Amino acid sequence: MEEKGRIDFCTACRKVTEYTLQKRNITKIIRDVEYTFSITVAVCVECGEEMSIPGLIDRNIQEIDEQYRAYKGLVSIADIEKLMKIYKIGKAPLSLALGFGEVTITRYLSGQVPSKEYSDIMRMTLSSPAFMKKKLHENKEKIASAAYNKAIEAATQLETLFSVSNKMLRVISYVFEKLEEVTPLMLQKLLYFIEGESYALNKKPMFYESCQAWVHGPVYPEVYDIFRDFKYNPIEDARFAIFEGTEDALTNEERRVIDLVVNTFGEYSGKVLERITHEETPWKLARKGYADNIPSNEPILMEDIEDYYTEKNAEYDFSSEYGLKKYIRDILQ
């Protein structure tokens, strides 16, 4: 893809000209192995020659570094920064906790490429809080008690995420990527609508966690426990950095479902979404016999969600944002 509207001095034309940024493949030999890298180049619009512009060399170095690490299956600098973020730990304590030298992480963050052995340790730590706790226990005597306690607490909190399925976690992470602000109430309702939309379009559930008919609408109890401390505030959860860039874990069909829900229901507050669920048959059936303010843990049956959203899809066409928005307008009116 080309980026236009940029100008700089072209040494071939001997004047300031417009240029475009394009991708070009180069080959480099590293440790006797030839690799092909895609780098960004600036091309003069008038003469077609490559131009040297400020910052481009640094950008190329970063591109080659990231692609080389991908070739070798090594963690990236961004992965290491995630480690520090989700476990609330500094560079030196993280190095010691993982059994490395005290300045190892600092060197990696400065661009030094880790060995496969050390990279695998960091990758395992990134994917498994239990492994991180094991490393912390092994190297407890090397770390200051304050740093140790903070990291242990973060790892314990991170473990609570895995009380739900990987699919649920990926869906939540994808919702966070798409929306700037999500409260716990809003998230609960979006997950319910995503489940219904999945039945409508794909004839199957997005995930298999059961939701319950609480006073304020459908709620997934395990998800509630994860985010209960945020109460009515927007969720800002560093733990979900562990899932950044994992959208490939969702299929195109699944992402389409989430996108449709986010782009329609996601325009409303949690309280408005609650009103919508209160008008829908699945929640009403599960709340039958309960007064409005009486708590309930009654499950909202998946077959009721499937039947309702299949029926409404036939009436409104939930495969388009237009159909979903018309449904929402009709419900709220």
Image: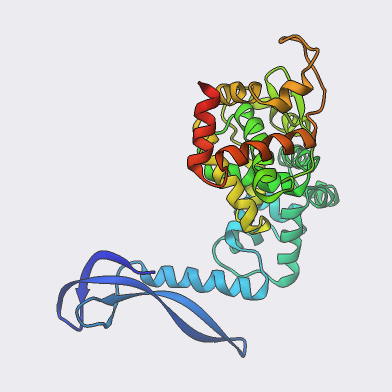
Asked if residue 86 shows in the view, the reply is no
Task: Estimate the x, y position of residue 321 in percent, counting from the top left.
Answer: 50, 43
- In the rendered image of this protein, does residue 117 appear above or below residue 325? below
Q: Which residue is most to the bottom?
A: 32
Task: Estimate the x, y position of residue 281 in percent, counting from the top left.
Answer: 70, 26
Choose top left, top right, bottom left or bottom right for residue 30.
bottom right
Asked if residue 66 shows in the view, the reply is yes
Q: Which residue is most to the front?
A: 315
Q: Exactly how many numbered labels are in the figure?
A: 0
Side of 87 relative to 156 (left or right) = left
Q: Quadrant of the N terminus?
A: bottom left
Viewer-proximal residue, 249 or 10? 249
Choose top left, top right, bottom left or bottom right for residue 65.
bottom right
Task: Estimate the x, y position of residue 253 in percent, counting from the top left.
Answer: 63, 55
Side of 234 relative to 249 (left or right) = left
Viewer-proximal residue, 300 or 57? 300
- In the rendered image of this protein, does residue 69 appear above or below residue 316? below
Task: Estimate the x, y position of residue 26 in percent, counting from the top left.
Answer: 47, 84
Residue at image coords 66%, 37%: 311
- The chosen color scheme is rainbow
Choose top left, top right, bottom left or bottom right for residue 118.
bottom right
Residue at image coords 65%, 52%: 254
Side of 16 relative to 249 (left or right) = left
Residue at image coords 61%, 23%: 274
Viewer-proximal residue, 315 or 214? 315
- In the rendered image of this protein, does residue 84 appear above or below residue 187? below
